[in-house]
Amino acid sequence: MKKLTLLLLALLYVTLTYAYTERDLLQKQADINRLKEILVLDRQWVTYPDYNDRAGWDRFLGTFKDEYIRRGEKRLNYQWQVVKATDYLAFERTGNRQIMEKPFGANNGAIADLLMAELAEGKGRFVDQLINGVFNACEMTSWALAAHIIVQPSHRALPAYDYPVIDLTSGDLGGLLAWTYHFMRPSFDKVDPEISRRLRHELQTRILDPYMNNDSFWWMGRNYNGRMLNNWNPWCNSNALMCFMLLEDNRDTLAKAVHLTMESVDKFLNYIKADGACEEGPSYWGHAAGKTLDYLELLSDITGDKVNIFNESMIKNMGEYISRSYIGNGWVVNFADASARGEGNSYLIYRFGKAVNSEELKGFAALMHQPKSSPNNGRDIFRTLASIAVDKELRQTEPRHENRPFTWYPETEFCYLSTKEGLFLAAKGGYNDESHNHNDAGTCSVWMNQTPILIDAGVGTYTRQTFSNERYSIWTMQSNYHNLPMINGVPEKYGKKYKATEVKAGKNSFEANIATAYPEEAKVKKWIRSYHVKGKQARISDSFELEEATAPNIVNFMTWGEIDRSEKGKVIIHVNNVKAALLYDAALFELTVEPKELDDIRLSKVWGSTIYRLSFKAKQQTNKGNYSFTIKKL
């Protein structure tokens, strides 16, 4: 059902069906009226116990109860931090995001811990400190991050008092505080009703009102002009919907708000590909597909399950992308800004599997599950509660996962190939304007025995530069630090028109013309990059035709571990207990090995202190030619 508005169509099926035409104001009002008829009001959709239902909370939390209390006890003497004006300004002055985000995040985590502890114990011991946290949050000018506040009219990082910004963090905190208001209002009122009144006011002015009245936030997709949408859309919309569901008592206003969220999330579902792949990579699956799950579950709850699209194949594909992208031993296929390390949130994966009836996801969730502690999703209190609700089912599920020999996402152009001998190759086509883009059309990564051999480095710690016009000055974003050629000495270029074309995939092969991902100065007519896997080895081939040979071609490969290039025509790569050989024609290429020291913790915690770029520089400049490399397990 791609390119149709899935959510709004689902709404039409609630009552009599009729021909789908371009929606006008009258039709929109008719849809809102339908919503009004089916909304579940007065928080009757909430399945969690009331605060005073001690037996209910004991049953719900089970063996987790004491741990939540202990975690809250550690916060009883927490010193609430002030996020200073200079903390916000540091983002502008130095590009450092953490100076503002660390104290803010610590406060939000403390609120969540105190709320869960009080729900678990129910004796009022944590109420005063929880009030301190709520009051501290209400006194802040904004709940958005310095890096995101710049959408305000001043485009500065210091928040304006009269322009509330809804971003990822303000939405999360709004959701946390809305649940706090829902559960704790009677307890707060016993202390002083002003606490709840102030909190309700701040939620109205910071979340509910701007969501209804400000259509300028890019992630909403209102007044949509075709620009990129990504994980921000379901993430922010799920939080907004949750706040309305927990706070809004007027049926008319609630119906309008729910309809706005449906229109917005439909824009996201129509932007991404129907094949379900997350172009942002597995690190963002929990924010993109995962937040879509949160949103759809909430939408089903507030409509009494009458608006439910979990049977759509696209939604199931979105879920199963995370299991298909898992190699093993904690390694994942990591295109774009994703990390190569990532085992996933087992509770979230299980919830997704349950929603779309995927045994693959349920088994994978059980494999990822490490039941060492209670579920804790920080400020995302909805996920913490939802995780507890499925814990028993998850623990009773048999762990299982297997790498399929062939997985193909024809729209996103991701291809995964694996063999019984333990080889796994991931390749991509795509274009160089994807969300969290790297210039990497045509690249690949190779694993042997669940160990990365040819790698995608990923991305370093986010700074102001990461999401600015300086992004492609960062080496991790450049094609010459991916497993790709420099054609006539020129790397790929950023932009939607720079893409792979003629992309094909088969049960053991992938190929694409990547000439179209390079700028004019590369002077390339055609460059067919192909991958073929068999048994313990993969062959990487380039067949090219240039308009003119102006500089030597260079084929780059990124790797790590121990490198031995002592024998001509062979590079031995030794990583942990795995040895591989990269074979090349020494008569055609001159090899240089460039160590790349990793001084960024986000990279070094994955790869260690050093990775390597193997650069194969062509000895001859020709207008036509063929290159071939073989990597095989020893």
Image (cartoon, grey):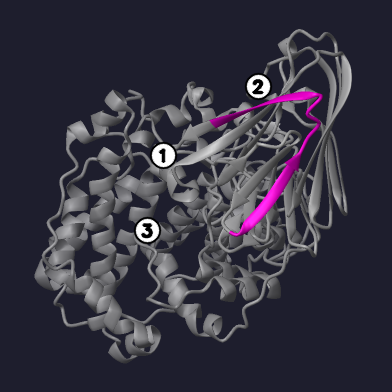
Up/down of 58 relative to 38, above or below: below
- Residue at x-position 60% and y-position 33%: 613
Circle 3 crowding by C-alpha within 10 Å: few under 14, some 14–19, many from 20: many
Residue 592 magenta-highlighted: yes
Residue under numbered circle 2:
493
Residue 216 magenta-highlighted: no
- Residue at x-position 15% and y-position 54%: 80
Quarter holding residue 37: bottom right
Of 159 and 503, the residue lying toward us: 503
- Residue at x-position 52% and y-position 53%: 287
Image marks 3 and 2: residues in contact by CB distance under 8 Å: no
Looking at the picture, which amino acid does disc 3 mark? Gly
Whichever of labels 1 and 2 marks the residue nearer the N terminus, that label is 1
Residue 175, label in figure: 3
Looking at the picture, which amino acid does disc 1 mark? Thr
Place of residue 25 in the rendered image (x, y in percent of width and height, measured from the top left) = 62, 42
Q: Secondary structure at mark 1?
A: loop
Mark yes or no: residue 437 visible. Answer: no
Place of residue 367 in the rendered image (x, y in percent of width and height, measured from the top left) = 58, 74
Looking at the picture, which amino acid does disc 2 mark? Lys
Distance of label 3 from label 2 (alpha carbons): 40 Å
Image marks 3 and 1: residues in contact by CB distance under 8 Å: no
Residue stretch in magenta:
577-594
Residue under numbered circle 1:
461
